[in-house]
Image (cartoon, rainbow, N blue to C red):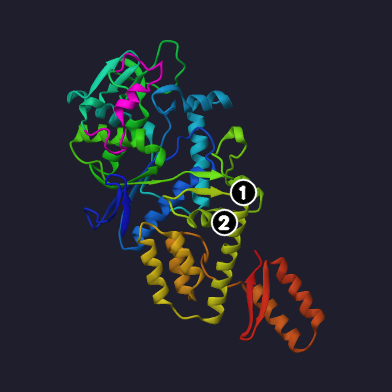
Amino acid sequence: MKLYNQLTKKIENFEPKNPNEVKVYTCGPTVYSYPHIGNYAAYIYWDFLTRALEFNGYKIKRVINLTDVGHLVSDADEGEDKLEKGAKREHKTVWEIADFYIKDFLENYHALNLLEPHKFARATGYIKEEEELVDALTEKGCTYEIPDGVYYDTSKFPTYADFARLDLENLKAGARVDFSSDKRNVSDFAVWKFVKPGEDHTMQWQYLDKPGYPGWHLECSAIIHKELGETIDIHTGGVDHIPIHHTNEIAQSEAAYGKKLSYFWMHCDFITIDGQKISKSLGNVYDLKDLAERGFSPMDYKIWVLQGHYRGDRNFTFADLAAAKTRHLNWRNRIAASYQKRISDNKEAMDKITAAVSDDLNSAAAFAIIDNSKLSTSDWARIDQLFGLNLINDSPDINDEVKQLISDREEARKNKDYAKSDEIRDKLVKLNITIKDTPDGSIWQYLN
């Protein structure tokens, strides 16, 4: 497989350090509100990565974190904790907010038929490990304490700017007026925040003899170290994670443990809607329930996502989603036809699909091959395994009731009893089945 690596800024051959187990980490959601369809696109892409790796014979150990503390409204260690904000908005406790939105996220995650990771890791389950990580950084002289918390001194990590190609001099020159004068460098970040006197922050733990909570960037490093070890094979996230979150992860992990955090870093680009950024103020924040109300299934949306490339600009429109829905129906009917006509396996097409997928996850190219190839039922089963689209379920066959109706219709047509034939056709329509008469005989198809 060839994958784009943000670490080297180029496409490279992927070779895991341990061929028996590929370690993958995915930055998960902050669980304080409903994720929108743009958020779920990332999990679709990284599920596809996992499936593609498995398709190529690798065994995967994957962890996804769930941020339930410490992610402030600003990624730059300022503002209100998002969980606290959600609790105030809904008049619930922060724990109730976290539990509710984790449940909602997992329901949609499973509705999209995304593979279960080795573990969903809640940040609040790793407080001990996070404190130990701060201790390790402090012992190595990488931190300093100011009134609002313990900060990582980025000047102690000489390659801090390399990952995102940051221009630290311009960053310093462009710092906001309210930049904390207590910080040594504008790029320094909090690894532990202290609860200020009078601050309403329910989630807090005693550390350094003060109430406080972990900085947002800390959790991923602590979870990776605990669950996957010192160095992993692939770290995934969104492009917005590159300049701050992932840059900070690398600095704190590699300073604390003295080992490379990840060999590969992969990031997906944003999705816009009708050419605009997804924003509540623009009224274009859609979730899977909104799509369902317009007649689109999670698999319709998943196909739309995979029609493009994870590193490409994607613009969502309902017209394009309708086209993806049409493709979804077409594929299901082609599977039905492959089963009824006993189509033979197409090794050449499957080899081309595998090659496309192995070329930096080129799902768009793979889809084009699928559209233009005659495929057997077993070919479709492998495609279903690769993309996770629930095209086949247990079998492409129909139940006995529908089979009997089809048989009765054929008998009626033979007897030229067209009234009865039409009556049976109407019954089949109610069961989402239509009959297509071809030169090779009649075949059944799905209506939607």
Residue 130 counted in the magenta span: no
Identify the disc placed on residue 197.
none
Q: Nearer the viewer, residue 141 or 172?
A: 172
Residue 119 screen position, x and y as percent: 37, 45
- Residue 288: tell me if it is visible: yes
Q: Secondary structure at mark 1?
A: helix
Q: How many marks?
A: 2
Check contact, mark 1 vs mark 2: CB within 8 A: yes
What residue is at 43 percent from the left and 51 percent from the top?
310
Q: Amino acid at mark 2?
A: Asp
Q: Quadrant of residue 67?
A: top left
Where does residue 368 sit, x and y in percent of width and height?
48, 66
Q: Residues within 10 Å of mark 2 (few under 14, many from 20)?
A: many
Q: Residue 89: x, y in percent?
A: 57, 25
Q: Secondary structure at mark 2?
A: helix
The residue that mark 1 highlights is 291
Image point 51% across, 61% down: which residue?
390
Extent of the magenta region = 159-183
Quadrant in the rendering for residue 283 = top right
Pointer 2 residue: 300
Q: Is residue 132 left or right of residue 429?
A: left
